[in-house]
Structure formats: structure tokens, C-alpha cells
Image (spheres, rainbow, N blue to C red):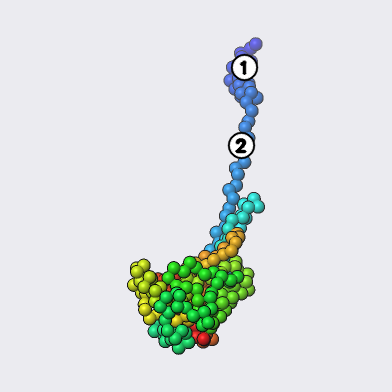
Amino acid sequence: MNKRQKALAILLTPFLLGFLLGFLVGGGCSRKERAPKQKKAQVDTVVRQQPPAGETEGQEDTLQLGDDVDGTGVTEAREIIYYTKLMSYGKVFDDINEVHLEKAKAVGLSRVPEKRDDLDPARLVKVENTDYLEIDELRHSVPFLTPGAARELNRIAKAFHDSLARKQFPIYKLVCTSILRTEEDVDRLRRSGNPNASDNSSHCYGTTFDISHSRYFRETETDEFMQPYELTKVLAEVLRDEKQAGRVLVKYERKEHCFHITACQK
């Protein structure tokens, strides 16, 4: 081997060794494939928008939350929202207690019953649970009304049911929380700590009843539900129509969580 060949061999030797070393290392190790990243299920958030400009009271729509977003076939409970212009209950239903009392004395019982045993069944109708109405546990009143008031209570409950059905909303019953009070009931109510209990209340004449705006009754539960806040929008529409027709006086009682209603017919 001459000097030129020796010099060439010296120059190529490092490259050959590097190639062989790289081949041995690469061939002896398996390449690991990275597992594909799993995509997280995206849950769409539904945001309630303000009604379009010029929308009038009574226009309606529903908004459903909690649909099957991950494709598993399992759905969560869906809240139904009544998409309508909110009524100012305090301004619409502002018949003061003195007006209720005056009307109750004009169309109701001629005298306030002292005790429950004094009730005259010939002048009163017993109010019971129906397909549209639930009578609450009455601790300080009895489930009796004059015929006109009983008809009005059932009319309101039926109209509320029909309005829910027409709007394709879940069906709830109204809850009646207070009806006829005897003098004995008024004393018992006052002793319970209610300073607003009055000896001269329209409840004492069989014409007046309270309907809750914070509680509604449901026979069976389903995936769809409505909050009391939304159901009260429907109830308020019914009461507004009855008030405009001259069939009732209504006072919105925020602290007592009810609509105080007096029927105007005997």
C-alpha cells in the first residue's frame, strides 16, 4: 500500500465506524408509536339571549339544557325555560287588603265563624285535591269556600293546566296554601308568630284563597322540569286574565310567597 492509499484509509476510517455504529444502534431498538390523544367531549353551553326588540308579552319559546352531548345515549335532566317578557307582579297585582275585605264582606259569609264546628255546609263548598290542584297541609285554615270562590279556584287551576299543556311544558299542579279562617284559626296563627294575622281578614268570609308562587306540585318526575320562577310566569298570565275579566282581586305577596286572591262572585 502506497502513501496515497494509506492517507485515504486514514480519512475514511472514522466515517465507516460511525456508519456501522449508527446501523447497529438503530436496528437494535424498536420505535415506539405515540398513542393518539383522545379528544375531550365538548359540551355546548346554551346562553339565554335577550328577547328581540319589539317583542310583546305572551310570545313564548322553550330552551332545553342537558341533552346527550357525548353520544352515550344517556341524557340528563332538561330544564325548560319560558321565554317571555317578565311581568311586574307587584304592579299588576296590587289590589290592597282593604279592597279584598270590602269585596269579601259583600259577597261572602254574613258573619265570621268562631270555630270550625260553626261552619255552615249549606253555604260552603269543601275544596279538595283535583287533577289540577293540590291542597297544602292547612294548619291555620280549613278547606271551605263559598260556591263562587270554589268555582274560581278550580277555574284558575284548570286554566293553568291547560296553558302548560298548550305550551307543551311539563305538567304541574297549583298549590293552595290558605283558605277559610275562623276566629279560632286567626288566634292560632297569631300565636304561631305571624304578626300579620288579622281578625278582619278577607280569609274569614270564605271568598279568599292563597296560591303559592314558590311551590308547585308534580305527580310524576320526568327528565324535563321547570323552576318555580318559570311556572309563575304562566300562573301570572292566568291571574291577569281573570283579573281583567273582573272575576278576582289579586295581591302579590312576596314575603308570604303567594298570590292572595279574592273571588268577586257569590
Q: Quadrant of residue 221?
A: bottom right
On screen, residue 127 above or below 222: below
* Mark whose residue sits in front, 2 or 1: 2
Residue type at the position of mark 2: Arg
Work out whether residue 176 or residue 86 is closer to the camera in this orientation and state it. Answer: 176
The residue sitting at 61% across, 55% down in the picture is 75
Residue 264 in view of the camera: yes
The residue sitting at 61% across, 23% down in the picture is 25
Q: CA distance from mark 2 to mark 1?
A: 43 Å
Q: Is 28 displayed left or right of 144 in the figure?
A: right
Q: Which residue is mark 1?
A: 9
The picture places residue 239, in percent across and down from the top left corner, at 52, 79
- The reply to whether discs 2 and 1 touch (Cβ–Cβ < 8 Å) is no
Q: Which residue is mark 2?
A: 34
Mark earlier in primary sequence (2, 1): 1
Work out whether residue 244 or residue 139 is closer to the camera in this orientation and state it. Answer: 139
Residue type at the position of mark 1: Ala
The residue sitting at 50% across, 68% down in the picture is 136
Q: Quadrant of residue 76?
A: bottom right
The picture places residue 41, in percent across and down from the top left corner, at 59, 50
Q: Quadrant of residue 1?
A: top right
Label 1: state its secondary structure.
helix
The residue sitting at 40% across, 73% down in the picture is 185
The picture places residue 108, in percent across and down from the top left corner, at 47, 84
Work out whether residue 96 or residue 109 is closer to the camera in this orientation and state it. Answer: 109
Label 2: state its secondary structure.
loop
Q: Residue furthest bottom?
A: 106
Work out whether residue 215 or residue 152 is closer to the camera in this orientation and state it. Answer: 152
